Every structure is written in structure tokens, then in C-alpha cells.
Image: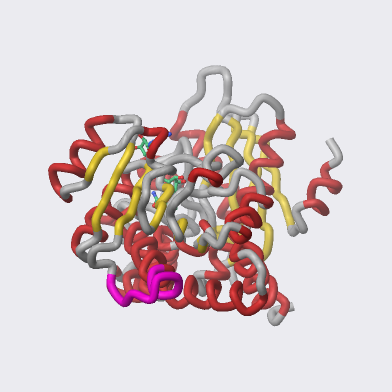
Amino acid sequence: MDLFGHLNAYDYGEVHFKLDKATGLKAIVAIHDSRLGPALGGCRFIEYATDEDAVIDALRLARGMTYKAALAGLAHGGGKSVIIRPKQHFDRVALFRAFGKFVDDLGGHYITAEDSGTGLEDMEVIRTVTKNVTGVDVANGGSGDPSPFTALGVRRGIEACVKFALGKDSLDGVHVAVQGVGHVGYHLCKELHAQGAKISVADVDPLKAERATREFGASVVELDQITAIACDVFAPCALGSALNDATIPRLKAKIVAGAANNQLAQPRHGDDLHARGILYAPDYAINAGGLVNVAQEVLGYDAGRSREKTLKIYETIFEIAERSQKMAAPTYRIADMLVEEKLATMS
Ligand code: NAD
């Protein structure tokens, strides 16, 4: 593996490795950038085909966290950890305790949280050996489910786009097509409904779509139609790569603004949206509400402060749209540029 080649490619940073024979722990902590503060980011616990895949996953994810935290105005850098899920039998509590000690040894330089494959119970185990953990139980000062905060930020981002592109001050009567009504999509529908928006939804799970109809009067459309229906806003809230060669030519919406991570299948799809005059709210800018919420745990959790900070996503998205117009450049590049400008002042 060309390890330092990978570090250069992702513009690093530091990476820490831990092998604990007693528990079978094989863990990687990637700290992409800590100029704004200690690196914050979740711990992923999944199987990897090779160690190299695990390293690249950690590098890629931690870099994304730097951008998300910086744009959300958090005093945190980007970090992420990966525990390679053992193929043989393992003691989960012992494994996460060993991981917690590893995090603790980093002296607060990295703060962990939940991610794919980890949950509240794992964070509670980690909490027994280090204070550098978030996403713990509400009873222990945790911030709870991040989805309502992510949805609040997405609603604010949609409002900014609607103001900028459609000149409207409210979502009343604005038609939003929500792809995926899981944790965030459900709460987004609730937010949109409260603002008087017209909602269409699609979900692979018909029960989730029906719930949105029952509670928010949403119309249900076929899975392959949600990107193509006539509407004002397309809100991807399911998986990544929703914006690709197949979907972009079909979009009738003037705005794309949703919660999903990695919405652009490739960066060039951000250029395609720009060329078609569709205002795209960059994913990591609009979906930062959950991270904003978890970050408040570090300071002593306060839901009011989380809400206040999440509401600011409106200004961030509006600024990106304005700069994009002024510089005739796609919004995803403007978002990256804002972060890079900010980090450069910290050098
Ligand atoms: P989730 O798994 O609860 O919801 C996803 C929903 O999408 C599910 O209901 C699923 O059935 C549906 N779905 C899957 N494939 C689909 C398809 N092809 N068409 C329509 N629906 C489909 O996940 P979530 O926590 O709501 O997160 C949604 C997205 O937002 C993910 O990309 C996630 O990474 C991102 N995100 C979530 C948070 C958060 O706070 N949970 C924060 C930031 C980003």
C-alpha cells in the first residue's frame, strides 16, 4: 500500500493505527485537519475486504468532516475512525473499551461519535474509558437522535434556495419532492408541512411513504418518478449518488436541496446542474444540522444552542448561491472554496 501516497492525495494530516491482540481490535483514527479545533467524527464498524480499503475509507470520510464542520462554523476539525469488524468471534464490550482507550491516548485530539455499525451502547462503553466521545445516552448528557436537527437545517437550506431562485419568502405552496422518508426525510416532511409546502414522496418501503401521506398529506409517487415529477424542489434524502447521468436530464425542479450524503455521483454532476440552471445546495453544507447538534455535547449539551446554530444554515446556503451567481461557478465548488478560505486564515 502506498500509504503516504494516499495521505498526499487526501491532503493529510495524521493517521493513527491500533492493533490490540487481546481483543482483536484493529482500528484507524484519521485526523484530516485540526486547525479549527479537535477533530470530530464518527466511528465506523464494518467489514472491509482489505486493510487498504479501511484506510481509504477513514481518509475519505475524515476529509469530508473537515469541510462539513468548517462550513457549519464549528470549532472542530475533521476526523473519522474505522474499526475493522473481526471475522472471528469477538467480545463487543471489550473491543469498544479497547477502542475507547485508543481514543483516550490521543489526548482529546480526536472526539468520536456514532457512525455505520456503531450505536449508543458502544458510545456508552467508550465513555467508561474516555471523555472524548459524543452520541452518548441523553441521560448522560447526550444529544439524542440527530435527524430532527438535520431536517431542520435542510428545511432552512430549502428556504434559502427558494428565496434565491424563486424570490419567495415562504414555503407556502412550494412543491417539494422528497426521495426517502426515513429518519431525516420523515422529519423534513414534518418541517415542510408546518410551513405549508406541498409534498410528494417516494420510498422503497411503502409503509414509510404511507405514513407521510397520513401525517402530512404527501402524495406518493413511483420510485423512478420522484426525480422526474414537475415540482419546485427535489430533496434527496435516501442514499448517495442520487444526482447522476440518468437523473439530472430528467429533473424538472429548479432546486436540488436534501439531506443525503454524497449526492453527486461525481463532481462533474455538480457542473451539469449548474449548466442546466438548477440551484444545488451542496450536501455537506445543508445536512450539517446533525453534526452541529452532536458537537454541542462537547460544550455541555444545550438543545437551544443546537437549534440556533442549525438555523444559520440558511445564511450559509444563501451566501453559496450568491457567490455561485457572481462567479459563474457551480455551488459545490463555491462551498469548497469557502472552507479552504477559512482554513487558510488559520494556517
Ligand atoms: P434512513 O435509512 O433512516 O432513511 C433512508 C430512507 O431512504 C429509508 O426510508 C429507505 O427505505 C429509503 N430509500 C432507500 N433507497 C431508496 C430509493 N432508491 N428511493 C427512495 N427511497 C429509498 O437514513 P437517514 O438517517 O434518514 O439518512 C438519509 C440520508 O441523509 C443518508 O444519505 C444519510 O447519510 C444522510 N444524513 C443523515 C443524517 C442524520 O442525521 N440521520 C445527517 C446527515 C446526513
Where 224 falls versus 77 (above or below)?
above
Q: Residue furthest top?
A: 88
Q: 210 and 4: which one is in front?
A: 210
The quarter of the picture where residue 326 lies is: bottom right
Q: 293 and 334: which one is in front?
A: 334
Is 197 left, or right, of 61 in this rendering? left
The quarter of the rendered structure image containing the N terminus is top right
- Identify the magenta region: 162-170
Answer whether residue 212 is visible to the viewer in this image.
yes
Answer whether residue 109 is visible to the viewer in this image.
no
Q: In the rendering, at what x and y percent does residue 313 appear?
A: 43, 71
The quarter of the rendered structure image containing the C terminus is bottom right
The quarter of the picture where residue 201 lies is: top left
Q: What residue is drawn where x is 38% and y is 64%? A: 158
Q: Residue furthest bottom?
A: 345
Where 56 falls versus 7 (above or below)?
above
Q: In the rendering, at what x and y percent does residue 134 appear?
A: 43, 56
Is 10 left, or right, of 116 in this rendering? right
Q: What residue is drawn where x is 38% and y is 61%? A: 154
Q: What residue is drawn where x is 18% and y is 40%? A: 211
- Locate ligand 1 by image quadrant: top left
Q: What residue is drawn where x is 25% and y is 37%? A: 209
The quarter of the picture where residue 265 lies is: top right
Q: In the rendering, at what x and y percent does residue 99 appear?
A: 55, 43
